[in-house]
Image (cartoon, rainbow, N blue to C red):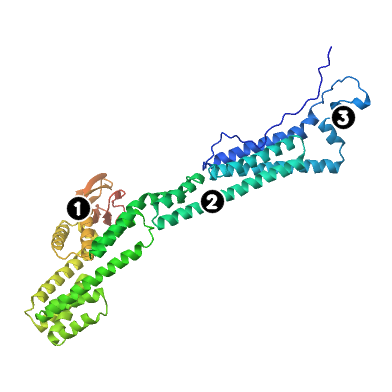
Amino acid sequence: MPDESGVIKPRAVPLSHTGREQPSGPTGLGGRRWLLLLVLAGAVVAVIGLFTVAPHWVEPLEVVAPAAAPSEATPSQNAAPRAAQDDQLPPYQALRREQARTEAGGELARFVELELKLREELRIGAWAEAQYDAARTLAQAGDEAFIAERFDAAIDQYRQAADALEALIDQGHAQFEDALNKGLAAIDERDPTGAEAWLSQAADIKPDSPALLSALQRAGHLPEVIVKFRTARNHELAGRWDQAVGTYQAIRALDADTPGLDGAIAAARRDRSEQVLRERLSAGFKALEQGNFERAEDAFQQALRIDPGNASAEGGLQQIADQSELVTIAELKRQAEQHAAAERWAEAAQANRRILALDANIQFARLGLEQAEAQSQALNTLKAIADGAERLSSDALFEEAQDILANAKTLSPRGPILAAAIEEMDVLLRRHGTPVPVLLRSDNATEVLLSNVGPLGRFAEKRLELRPGGYTLIGSRDGCRDVRTEINVQPSMAPVEIRCVELLQR
């Protein structure tokens, strides 16, 4: 019978192989990464165990080989089983061998983790394919050395492979940043062709980068930005400053990071202000020549708001100052208007009274005084009603508050303070004008009286619809002391109990 025995050769297992079919771009799934790491780490441990633990559990096969002369011994006779060789090693050498196996497994794990990191963070395209293949070739050589239990060689190969991947990751990030920065620079220089070329290179490496996506969005708006810049310049050349500013604002809406935009807007506004300043000065001196001091002062004051300290405007005001009473009246008028604009109505009224003390026939002062007094009274009354909102449970006070609010709405101008007071009162009256359910509980023996409503009689429970606000409940019962309870009716309030329980002493 022919001898069928022979040497059993281990099959090489690609420990570092994670499969070319995996996605080559970033995934962003941290959980999948750690799951893969756990699986791969388990595979590494299993393979290590195959060479450390298994030989001690499995009886070695007895291979029967034909007799041969000592000089013609078969390979299986010259190479004892690996486990047997390990058993024959001195303790220190066996320990060192085990440490080398463990260190090789650590370098393998580092390579696998870096490969996962590369695939998650970067797209492996033409820029990286050659280096990536070279690193994988090193790792596969490490696999072969590991399976052959040449652990020092495996350590070296795995380490070189991991170092190559680490360098490739750094290179990818550096190339991406360089292409992205050059793309952004091209955008800032309004170079659509250059921006497209550089951003395309960046997209080959990290297509899902938020910074890249933002840059691509800016690049997409670049042709329109260029057209609008040209349009804005044409508006400026024609003295259409408002249109120029509006066009610049439209550019900002497209790409707020456009360089030079703030300076262009500021320059357009400055040029517009200078044009308006010239118009106001011209109007002021023309009114001064016509003897219209009020209009002249108004024009000069507008000019000073545009250019504080303007010598021409101040000179015009000095000419008006030659007539003392007119200057005083103009100044008081300015103060009254300033106080009115700030809704300081008591001060506005005082300024108008001082004008009328100089000339009782000045119409704008009369109107200003009436306006200031009406505004001041309305604000004070609305505030008083809001401060005592609980009294709005009274029908008479509620109706009076409605009349006061209606009168306040007729006032003009309606500044922010008055508008806020009117809005607050509107809300307050809507809330206090809408009845809410209230549950009263008693003992069927107490006579109950509710202010603003009247007697409620005796009851165990009574449901009422009451407008929000303050009420007084009075309970009385023969032989017991009366009880008095103040309640503030609000939406979703808890039931209210009213009953007489304290007996009178006889």
Query: In the image, what residue type sits under mark 3?
Result: Asn
Q: Residue furthest left?
A: 361
Instruction: Kindly identify the amino acid type of the residue bearing the numbered disc 1.
Output: Gly
Q: Quick one: label 2 or label 1, which is nearer the N terminus?
A: 2
Residue at left offset 27%, top offset 69%: 271
Disc 2 to disc 1, C-alpha distance: 70 Å
Above or below, 32 relative to 445: above
Quarter occupied by residue 451: bottom left
Residue 401 at x, y percent in the picture: 16, 60
Q: Is residue 157 visible?
A: yes
- Identify residue for label 1: 433
Q: Residue furthest right?
A: 70
- Pinpoint residue 289: horizontal percent, then vertical percent: 11, 81
Q: What residue is rendered at 12% in x and 83% in y?
A: 326
The circle on residue 78 is 3
> In front here: 486 or 155?
155
Say the numbered circle drawn on residue 175: 2
State if disc 1 and disc 2 touch (CB < 8 Å). Answer: no
Q: Secondary structure at mark 1?
A: helix
Query: Could you say where residue 456 lies in the image, as x and y percent from the top left?
Result: 20, 49
